[in-house]
Image (cartoon, rainbow, N blue to C red):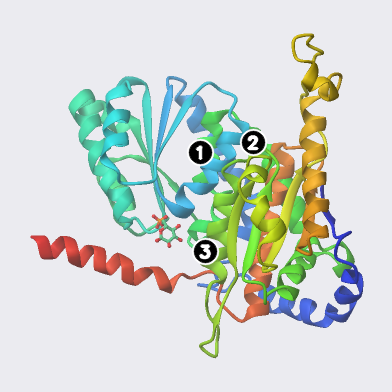
Amino acid sequence: MLRLDTRFLPGFSEELKAHAPLLLEAREALLAKRGQKGAMLGWMDLPEDTETLREIRRFREQNPWVEDFVLLGIGGSALGPKALEAAFADSGVRFHYVDHVEPEPIRKLLQSLNPHKTLVNAVSKSGATAETLAGLLLFLDWLKAHLGEAWRRHLVVTTDPKGGALRALAGREGLRAFAIPEEVGGRFSVLSPVGLLPLAFAGADLDALLMGARKANEQALAPLEESLPLKTALLHHLHRHLPIAVFMVYSERLRYLPAWFVQLHDESLGKRDQEGRRVGTTALPALGPQDQHAQVQLFREGPLDKLLTLVIPESPVEDLPLPPVGELPEAGYLFGKTLFRLLKAEAEATYQALAEAGQRVYALYLSEVSPYTIGWLLQHLMWQTAFLGELWGVNAFDQPGVELGKRLTRAFLEGEG
Ligand SMILES: O=P(O)(O)OC[C@H]1O[C@H](O)[C@H](O)[C@@H](O)[C@@H]1O
């Protein structure tokens, strides 16, 4: 279950009524583009794709020898799997992410891995990302040096169905390749093979994940009163004059989720609108309770320039009671409580304290942290982002602003000869 709470934002239901025509028009405009080539709305259909899920399961079963899984990918090709694997891994397979180009950790990783037990997954929609290609050069070389002709079984690619360097490599060498559908962009690809393949090796419950995502689809299309993504999109729309959108998650298992949301929100919505005006709000990642001891001072007493989203689980999957320990009477107020009760009390206290400070804050309650609720949450946030793209008059599915940096990097390298 995913539930929106706006108790500290009085007047929201009136705003919802007042903005109904705008919201319904935005949804209609978005849905009118569904199926159009280049609209990049393929993410809406991923939760229904049971055929791909079957193929991925088969591949997982054919490769029971895998002990280490190395994901070469960056941005939308890494943030989703990283967030979900950290939350739901259950198989004992160790995961490593090469989503950077710093030599020392890569050297260390290569030295620590057993090539015979390692599966390398190169993930890139474009097949042209410098960081991913650099990692691939190193890992290809390493696999070939240790395994000879057998290296091909240890490399699987996830990429565009037709184009790009990874697709060409897979074709030439006969590698196993999974497709990121043409109409699915990187930051909307977590429920494609980008996320599903690593998660199959992690032993996560993929049926539940996709079932949750289908629930978000259902709600996105529901009448306004039941349409959670239209409501949260409106919250962001009403607060678009506040430059910062804090995304604070009260779950250690979900520690990498804020980074996934940052890319989704910032790269989709931070751009020029049709009139050339700069629009967007800056998503700021935060984790509870850790950031209560780092950021909450600023949130309480610093500028009132934020809309805060708190993601709060309502119950644990497993809890730990806090035993009374005679040697530590100072902790007596915790005796007999449970760890989850403490976590929940901290989340609620922060929620209230932020509202009392005058910050604009709402909560998304998860019945618990499970593949079902997180599948729901991820797809919900993708809908929210797509609706905001319509409301703010920007294309939520491109990223023209990152191109210059890439071109310059290449020019610098080529200039060096
Ligand atoms: O999946 P890839 O094509 O390798 O892209 C990886 C990432 O790099 C790019 O610079 C884009 O800004 C991101 O949206 C994308 O997720």
Q: Earlier in the sequence, mark 2 or mark 1?
A: 1
Q: Nearer the viewer, residue 60 or 349?
A: 349
For residue 33, say whether it is visible.
Answer: no
Disc 2 to disc 1: CB gap under 8 Å: no
Q: Nearer the viewer, residue 252 or 306?
A: 306
Quadrant assignment for the C terminus: bottom left
Q: Residues within 10 Å of mark 2 (few under 14, many from 20)?
A: some
Query: Which numbered disc covers residue 183?
Result: 3
- Secondary structure category for the residue under label 1: helix
User: What's the amino acid at mark 3?
Assistant: Glu
Q: Quadrant of ligand 1?
A: bottom left
Residue lying furthest top in this view? Answer: 326
The residue at 33%/49% (across/down) is 132
Residue 222 horizontal/vertical position (percent):
83, 64
The residue at 82%/38% (across/down) is 345
Residue 218 horizontal/vertical position (percent):
78, 57
Task: Please indicate whether residue 343 sits to the left or right of residue 139 in the image.
Answer: right
Q: Which residue is mark 2?
A: 252
User: Real-space Cα distance between discs 3 and 1?
Assistant: 19 Å
Q: Which residue is mark 1?
A: 197
Q: Nearer the viewer, residue 157 or 291?
A: 291
Q: Is residue 90 above or below residue 37?
A: above
